[in-house]
Image (cartoon, rainbow, N blue to C red):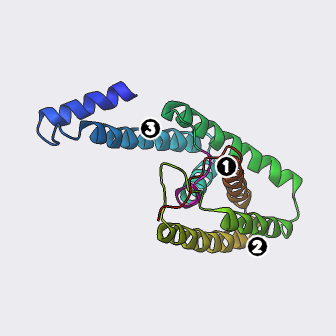
């Protein structure tokens, strides 16, 4: 995929859309766009072929939270891409299994509230690539609080109508929590920038 991104970047330089000076930065941006497009294309294909919207719900939930909470990161982008796809498939499967185990709809919001509380307390993970300042850290924490409240309300309403998709949201939150724990265990956290 990197060679494709390099060819796209070279083409953009050749037709004078971007300067040669920032080739590495532009190649990184192209890689991000191509990998995001490919990732979402695969997720949409899984959802359509499997007639299961939970792939989209799980992916949207985990990506929204990961954007603000941070968590464990792999060093290789290609390995990360594959593991992310596997995590989505596994997360949706775990949601299905969880819906068969926890059939009491009143229990799911309580468990979700506990996980969201833990996520808010432990995040954001200040990954060395981010290197947040104290102000940025507080902004991210505020965003985590807001999306946690919104997510809880949505999950609670889904539990009232007994939608199986609630388990998918719960599964995504559980994965986010695990990734935060892994980042802390493997010491992927930098001190706040002054």
Q: Main secondary structure of the magenta part?
A: helix
Numbered-mark total: 3
Mark 3 residue element: helix
Mark 2 residue element: helix
In the visual, does 28 lie left or right of 155?
A: left
Highlighted range, magenta: 65-72
Which circle's residue, 3 or 2, is located before the other in the chain?
3
x, y (%) of residue 50?
62, 41
- Give the farthest residue toward the top: 3
CA–CA distance between discs 1 and 2? 29 Å
Circle 2 residue:
160
- Give the farthest residue toward the front: 194
In the visual, does 95 lie left or right of 143?
A: right
Q: Is residue 60 above or below residue 134?
A: above
x, y (%) of residue 158?
70, 68
Q: Nearer the viewer, mark 1 or mark 2?
A: 1
Circle 3 residue:
38
Q: Residue at x 81, y 54 (%)?
A: 99
x, y (%) of residue 78?
50, 31
Q: Are marks 1 and 2 in contact (CB under 8 Å)?
A: no
Which circle's residue, 1 or 2, is located before the other in the chain?
2
x, y (%) of residue 142?
56, 73
> Label 2 neighbourhood size at 10 Å, few (<14), some (14-19), many (20+)?
few
Q: Is residue 37 above or below residue 53?
A: above
């Amino acid at each position: 995929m990197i060679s494709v991104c390099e060819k796209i970047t070279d083409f953009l330089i050749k037709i004078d859309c971007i300067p040669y000076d920032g080739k590495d930065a532009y190649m990184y941006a192209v890689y991000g766009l191509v990998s995001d497009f490919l990732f979402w294309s695969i997720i949409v294909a899984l959802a359509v072929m499997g007639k299961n919207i939970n792939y989209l719900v799980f992916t949207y939930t985990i990506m929204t939270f990961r954007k603000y909470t941070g968590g464990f990161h792999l060093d290789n982008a290609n390995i990360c891409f594959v593991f992310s796809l596997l995590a989505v498939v596994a997360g949706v499967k775990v949601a299905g299994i969880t819906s068969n185990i926890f059939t009491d709809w009143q229990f799911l919001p309580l468990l979700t509230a506990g996980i969201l509380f833990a996520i808010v307390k432990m995040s954001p993970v200040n990954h060395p690539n981010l290197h947040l300042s104290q102000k940025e850290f507080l902004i991210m924490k505020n965003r985590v609080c807001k999306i946690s409240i919104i997510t809880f309300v949505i999950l609670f309403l889904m539990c009232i109508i007994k939608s199986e998709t609630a388990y998918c949201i719960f599964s995504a939150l559980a994965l986010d929590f695990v990734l935060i724990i892994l980042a802390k265990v493997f010491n992927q956290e930098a001190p706040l920038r002054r």
